[in-house]
Amino acid sequence: MDLRDQEEDAARETPADAGCCPKCQMTARVAVALSTTFLVMGLFLCLIMFVRWTAAPEDDHLVYKTSLKQQTERLQQCQKERHDLTVMLHTATRDSRCSLCPDGWLWWRSHCYFFSVGVQENLRWNESAEFCWKHNSSLAVITDSAEMEFIQSVMRSFPKFPFLWVGLTDTQQEGRWQWSDGTDIQDHMSLTVEWDADHRDCADLRGGGSLFAASCEAYGPWICKKDS
Ligand SMILES: *[C@@H]1O[C@H](CO)[C@@H](O)[C@H](O)[C@H]1NC(C)=O
Ligand SMILES: *[C@@H]1O[C@H](CO)[C@@H](O)[C@H](O)[C@H]1NC(C)=O
């Protein structure tokens, strides 16, 4: 049999089968009904899954949105509290500055410090000592490493790290360095003055807490210190 015969056979058989086999028709109907049912059920299931699938992210999104809203509210609350605290702190520091230290002086550990850098013209050591004296203070006497670190941290805040006159001199007796309060250099903490020489009787403070002997006639910035 060739292909044409097969086709002819098929064409002959189909109407014959359809016409003479109610059982087949029944089976076909049942099959159609079943497959329709399955199809509908499948579609229904798909629909349910689709709804759940689309609803789930919707729910997540909602949860996310809710938590985001809560977070935002919390953040706003924090920001408000921070603002209030800043205002309070500002008021408090302004108050304490008024009562503890004069304007332009820094308060640290129950003392007030004045850094002349950028505020006053540079002066000789004796003139800067006079400036401090006129402001009821004296050139700074540094008594411990914490105070040294505080002073260094302020010095670091200037654009150019300055050297500063402090209350340390050996004018009374060459080589015997004394603080403005009459104590010897080593009485408070272990310090030495570098570059000591006959004509250099005043100490300036530099980075890293080092002290250098300089001519008292040199002009420079200085630090005053007084009780708050
Ligand atoms: C500071 O010392 C210089 C000389 O070294 C002197 O001419 C000047 O009067 C002194 N100033 C003060 C305020 O003591
Ligand atoms: C220094 O202290 C005296 C008396 O305590 C006071 O009258 C004077 O105003 C003070 N001067 C400065 C610059 O604070």
Image (cartoon, rainbow, N blue to C red):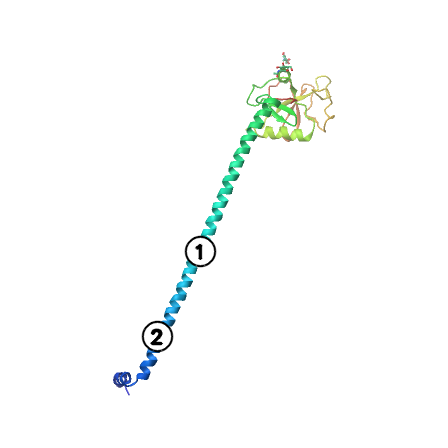
The amino acid at mark 2 is Ala
Find disc 1 in the rendering and name its residue.
57
> Residue 122, percent across and down?
58, 19
Q: Distance between the residues labelled 2 and 1?
A: 36 Å
The residue tagged with tag 2: helix, strand or loop? helix
Residue 160 in view of the camera: no
**Residues at marks 2 and 1 touching, judged by CB atoms closer than 8 Å:** no
Q: In this view, does 52 lie to the left or right of 172?
A: left
What residue sits 45% from the left and 57% below the top? 56
Q: Quadrant of the image for the N terminus?
A: bottom left
Q: Which of marks 2 and 1 is nearer the N terminus?
A: 2
Depth check: give the residue in front, 59 or 184: 59
Q: In this view, does 175 lie to the left or right of 216?
A: right
- Name the quadrant containing residue 150: top right
Q: State the residue lying farthest toward the bottom.
A: 1
> Residue 184, percent across and down?
74, 23
Rendered image: mark on residue 181 = none
Relative to 125, say whether 189 is above or below. Answer: below
The residue tagged with tag 1: helix, strand or loop? helix
> Residue 129, percent across and down?
64, 17
Q: In this view, does 176 lie to the left or right of 60?
A: right
Residue 29 in view of the camera: yes
- Mark 2, mark 1: which one is toward the viewer? 2
- Name the quadrant containing residue 37: bottom left
> Residue 4, percent across and down?
25, 84
Find disc 2 in the rendering and name its residue.
33
Taking the image as four quarters, which one is ligand 2 found in?
A: top right
What residue sits 51% from the left and 36% below the top? 80
The amino acid at mark 1 is Pro
What residue sits 51% from the left and 39% below the top? 77
Depth check: give the residue in front, 186 or 17: 17
